[in-house]
Image (cartoon, rainbow, N blue to C red):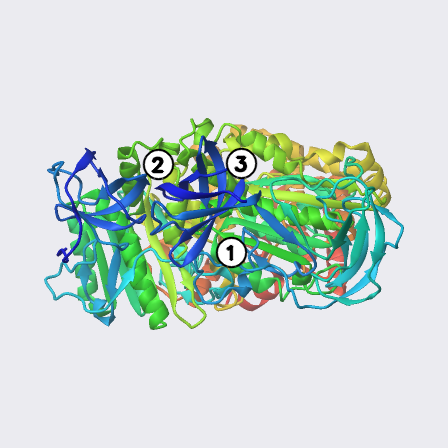
């Protein structure tokens, strides 16, 4: 018999329930109130009192209301049909909810029970299988969606029978497996998994090394992220976090993109809903929405659902990774998630840590980032979750707890900067503060030298040194004045400006410049570095500025032109003519 | 609030603080309203049979034997067309001497809109102020605050925006408004002859601060009535949200809650989000746009109130007194309208995005030149041109007393470009340069 209870106390969305049996931490329960059952999660237990955080408004709830405990933690349903869905933080299908306003206690199943899927078996009777083994596949928006042995089972099983190729619904039995004792298990296309536990049905998790192309130059060229890598984008509000994240999710070379809008502005979520169905995947030519799942939790939805949403998104990502797919997961913003943690910790009257965040904030963040990664599955295939989170530090202060905790665990750091944004240098990623740890991996260097060019990393480092030098010179000019530094210094400074304007800056709202394939990035870096490597002769610093502004203008026009088009070639010719003027 | 027959009256209060009182009662719902000796109160905490009530007016003079009556419902507002042209207090009662409103009783602070049912905002709200229309265009369905120090003329700018915006209804929520500012709004609306499309809910500094907590929900319930039931375009003005947040912290402090950052309650983000997310473009055509004021202390945006506000709203507008021209401008650096991308170059002229960016970039160059000047360095010819540009740009474009159309703003900016710069210094797409340079 399952545990039940009665409401004893209510403080906003924290409800105290007196229970009549065993309960477990993070167990789900349903509280009866008038017309609805409110879902809640146990977050603390003291004696017979379970403290539960309710995922919905508690208005009108009275003491003495009945509570039923579900006997499991917050789970998501996994199966074919998740792609293209707009889910909320608790995995409800938002499109199935009627009415303009959300109704309390309305929960909708995320999958379609009646749709027929073309099933193809991959395993055969007699095969030995374990959790995560592929039994068969269905076609889900051109992705091979694997039907797997449920992640929850332990030990090895033998396939007794498997369905023939044909059309099946998600709850039809597609395989029967038996364990060593002869106990049979019927398997359909649906399984459930608790969101706060990682899915670890893989053989090993080596260091990731394959470039994940995003089409954003300041990432791919300057600070590359890899398949299965982790990165984070901190920045004060207004510096372009969301635009950058959207650019990555639109352009990343991935099979599946999951966007966790965690406590996000509803109008920005709408932007994804409206834009994605229209946009084409630059890599396949199909609609972007076909490979996208949106987990949308707008900022006014209850705080507990906000906290759950990133876990829901990560669990779905792990599910698709287990199929050998390349998944990109974006969370905007992890600060709002941390704020949700803070709010609940405060409500529980826990003693606050730095900035009133819970003491274990950094452990929670570290644990969450650790769920990303590149894996070798048990059958030899590979899969990955590349995770990029945004952080919104108060007033741009990168010393606050969420940024600091994230910096310790994420391998790529894309520091958005107010000053860059003010002068409309977008993406406003500070090229000197930002880094990618992957550049230091020998396995990455080997991979990238075959993919692009053997001297690629050397050239990128040369570019970064020049940027650094340019910044130092700018500081000297600010202290000493234009006249007091040698003309050479001005030349070097303007070379760094050229790199900034033509390589680092990119117009996310221009049809052509928005996406820059790696081949084009290679071409542009070579071109600009050739300009930078040359020596120039000038009479005074004003000439240097005028001259480089003309070069920059040509470079920018090139970025707006179709790669290798007539216009593009015309600009190269103009550039060459210009270079001849002052080059030594 | 009149009592009804057979209502249970409680008379044993066990605990009284400055804002709350606690008593034993049964069958009470969370967030339910009550009266304590006739003063309106709301249930904020239930612990067994102990009910804690937040008394909006404050608990001065409340005795332990006060009469407490539970009303069995959350706070409501009577909604109907009669709301138009009227002034109300935080409880939705008329304060203009006019008759009571007849209409449907609606619970305030209702549920949120399903994000998949929202439409993408796409209509420009023109204000005639270039710092807004040119650089930070507003869109209906958006929510945006003015971040301003208390000495800045934010209420005047808001009143101007309200009058120039093409809205069917304007709903003003005044929280801790000084009596002078309240009368200012009243006068401006009256003189413009638009009072009949304005609804105001006002809590002045003369009223108890805790009452302010009801204002935003009252305002937004009225806004939803006009936007949903009548498909109207509603513009909501909230001033000042910092005082609203202060009231939140007063209540949480008096309930002995552990304070979170900057003495604000831990739920500040959720509390603010519940209000701001009511901004929406409904599929049937109605919309709610929210323009709010968040006052800052010495320009500090790291404080929990502006910080949380910035997370939730779609941008922010900063006002700044420009010493070069002696006028207030909308700061082009720190201001931002996130939704402007949905209208600029689409609902406005094609060159809008590039002109806007180029002008702000050149304005940044002028700021650098100014630093140089202040440090005693010689300026280059470019620096001097940038400085002249910036001054003209502030004077003829950014100043908040300029009132021109968006196309005129663009033309003016092009004129400034060609007056002070060469084409290659402006970095604009060739096709626009060909079309608009020296026109």
Closer to us: A439 or B406: A439
In the rendered image, the vertical position of residue B190 relative to residue B306, given as above or below: below
Front disc: 1 or 2: 2
In the rendered image, the vertical position of residue A87 relative to residue B12, given as above or below: below
- Does residue B417 appear in this view? no
Left or right, A548 with reference to A356: right
Left or right, B9 with reference to A53: left
Residue A56, position as x, y percentages in the image: 44, 50
What is the spatial separation of the Cα atoms under label 1 and label 2, in whole angstroms? 27 Å
Q: Quadrant for the N terminus of chain A, please.
A: top right
Mark 2, residue position: B264
Which residue shows up at 30% across the image and 53% down it?
A: B216
Residue B151, position as x, y percentages in the image: 26, 43
Callout 1: chain: A
Callout 3: chain: A
Front disc: 2 or 3: 3
Mark 3, residue position: A25
Contact (CB < 8 A) between labels 2 and 3? no
Callout 2: chain: B
Check disc 2 and report its element: helix, strand or loop.
loop
């Amino acid at each position: 018999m399952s545990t039940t209870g009665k409401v004893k106390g209510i403080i906003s969305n924290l409800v105290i329930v007196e229970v009549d049996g065993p309960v477990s931490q993070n167990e789900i329960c349903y509280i009866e109130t008038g017309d609805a059952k409110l879902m809640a999660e146990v977050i603390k237990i003291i004696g017979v009192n379970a403290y539960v955080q309710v995922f919905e408004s508690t208005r009108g709830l009275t003491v003495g209301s009945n509570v039923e405990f579900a006997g499991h933690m917050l789970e998501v349903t996994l199966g074919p049909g998740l792609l293209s869905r707009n889910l909320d933080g608790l995995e409800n299908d938002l499109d199935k909810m009627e009415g303009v306003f959300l109704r309390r206690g309305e929960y909708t199943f995320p999958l379609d029970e009646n749709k027929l899927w073309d099933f193809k078996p991959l395993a055969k009777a007699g095969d030995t299988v374990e959790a995560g083994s592929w039994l068969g596949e269905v076609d889900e928006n051109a992705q091979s969606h694997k039907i797997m042995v449920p992640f929850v089972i332990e030990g090895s099983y033998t396939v007794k029978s498997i369905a023939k190729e044909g059309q099946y619904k998600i709850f039809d039995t597609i395989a029967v497996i038996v364990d060593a004792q002869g106990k049979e298990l019927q398997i359909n296309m649906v399984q459930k998994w608790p969101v706060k536990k990682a899915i670890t049905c893989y053989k090993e998790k080596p260091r990731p090394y394959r470039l994940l192309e995003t089409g954003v130059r300041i990432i791919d060229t300057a600070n590359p992220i890899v398949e299965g890598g982790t990165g984070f984008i901190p920045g004060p509000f207004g510096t372009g976090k969301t635009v950058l994240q959207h650019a990555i999710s639109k352009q990343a070379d991935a099979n599946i993109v999951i966007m966790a809008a965690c406590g996000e502005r509803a109008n920005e979520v709408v932007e994804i809903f409206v834009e994605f169905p229209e946009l084409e995947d630059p890599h396949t030519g199909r609609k972007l929405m076909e490979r996208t799942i949106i987990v949308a939790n707008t900022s006014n939805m209850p705080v507990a659902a906000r906290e759950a949403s990133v876990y829901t998104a990560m669990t779905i990502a792990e599910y698709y990774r287990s199929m050998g797919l390349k998944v990109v997961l974006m969370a905007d913003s992890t600060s709002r998630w941390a704020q949700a943690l803070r709010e609940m910790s405060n409500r529980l009257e826990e003693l606050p840590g730095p900035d009133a965040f819970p003491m274990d904030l950094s452990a929670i963040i570290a644990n969450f980032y650790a769920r990303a990664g590149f894996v070798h599955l048990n059958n030899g295939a590979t899969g990955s979750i590349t995770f990029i989170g945004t952080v919104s530090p108060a007033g741009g202060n990168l010393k606050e707890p969420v940024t600091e905790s994230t910096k310790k665990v994420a391998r790529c750091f894309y520091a958005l900067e107010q000053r860059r944004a003010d002068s409309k240098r977008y993406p406003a990623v500070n090229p000197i503060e930002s880094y990618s740890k992957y550049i230091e991996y020998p396995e990455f260097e080997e991979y990238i030298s075959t993919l692009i060019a053997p001297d690629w990393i050397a050239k990128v480092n040369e570019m970064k040194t020049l940027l650094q030098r340019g910044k130092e010179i700018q500081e000297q000019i600010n202290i000493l004045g234009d006249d007091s530094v040698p003309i050479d210094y001005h030349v070097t400074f303007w070379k760094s400006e050229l790199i900034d304007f033509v390589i680092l800056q990119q117009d996310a709202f221009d049809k052509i410049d928005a996406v820059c394939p790696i081949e084009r990035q290679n071409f542009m870096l070579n071109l600009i570095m050739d300009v930078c490597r040359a020596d120039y002769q000038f009479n005074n610093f004003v000439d240097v500025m005028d001259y480089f502004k003309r070069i920059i203008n040509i470079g920018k026009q090139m970025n707006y032109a179709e790669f290798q088009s007539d216009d593009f070639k015309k600009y190269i010719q103009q550039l060459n003519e210009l270079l001849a003027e002052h080059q030594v | 609030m009149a009592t009804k027959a057979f209502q249970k009256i409680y008379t044993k209060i066990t605990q009284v603080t400055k804002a709350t009182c606690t008593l034993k009662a049964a069958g009470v719902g969370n967030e339910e309203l009550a009266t304590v000796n006739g003063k309106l109160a709301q249930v904020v905490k239930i612990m067994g049979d102990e009910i804690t009530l937040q008394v909006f007016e404050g608990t001065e003079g409340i005795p332990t034997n006060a009469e407490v009556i539970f009303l069995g419902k959350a706070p409501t507002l009577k909604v109907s067309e009669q709301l138009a042209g009227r002034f109300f207090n935080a409880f939705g009662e008329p304060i203009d001497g006019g008759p009571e409103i007849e209409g449907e009783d609606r619970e305030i602070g209702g549920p949120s809109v399903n994000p998949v049912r929202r439409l993408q905002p796409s209509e420009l709200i023109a204000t005639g102020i270039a710092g807004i229309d040119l650089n930070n265009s507003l869109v209906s369905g958006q929510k945006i605050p003015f971040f301003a120090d208390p000495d800045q003329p934010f209420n005047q700018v808001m009143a101007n925006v309200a009058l120039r915006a093409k809205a069917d209804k304007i709903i003003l929520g005044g929280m801790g408004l000084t009596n002078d500012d309240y009368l200012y709004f009243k006068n401006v609306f009256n003189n413009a002859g638009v009072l009949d499309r304005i609804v105001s809910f006002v809590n002045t500094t003369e009223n108890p601060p805790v009452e302010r907590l009801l204002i935003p929900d009252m305002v937004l319930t009225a806004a939803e009535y006009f936007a949903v039931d009548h498909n109207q375009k509603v513009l909501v003005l909230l001033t000042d949200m910092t005082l609203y947040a202060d009231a939140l912290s007063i209540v949480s402090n008096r309930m002995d809650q552990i304070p979170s950052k900057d003495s604000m309650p831990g739920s500040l983000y959720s509390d603010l989000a519940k209000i701001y997310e009511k901004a929406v473009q409904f599929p049937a055509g109605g919309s709610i746009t929210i323009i709010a004021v968040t006052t800052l202390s010495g320009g500090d945006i790291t404080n929990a109130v502006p910080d949380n506000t910035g997370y939730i709203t779609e941008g922010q507008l900063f006002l700044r007194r420009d010493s070069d021209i002696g006028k207030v401008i909308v700061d082009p650096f720190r201001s931002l309208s996130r939704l402007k991308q949905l209208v600029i170059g689409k609902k406005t002229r094609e060159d809008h995005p590039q002109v806007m960016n180029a002008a702000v970039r050149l304005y940044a160059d002028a700021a650098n030149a100014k630093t140089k000047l202040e440090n005693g360095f010689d300026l280059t010819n470019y620096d001097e041109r940038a400085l002249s540009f910036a001054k003209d740009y502030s004077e003829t474009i950014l100043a908040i007393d300029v009132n021109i159309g968006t196309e005129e703003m663009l033309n003016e900016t092009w004129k400034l470009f060609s007056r002070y710069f060469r084409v290659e210094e402006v970095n604009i797409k060739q096709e626009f340069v060909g079309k608009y340079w020296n026109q």
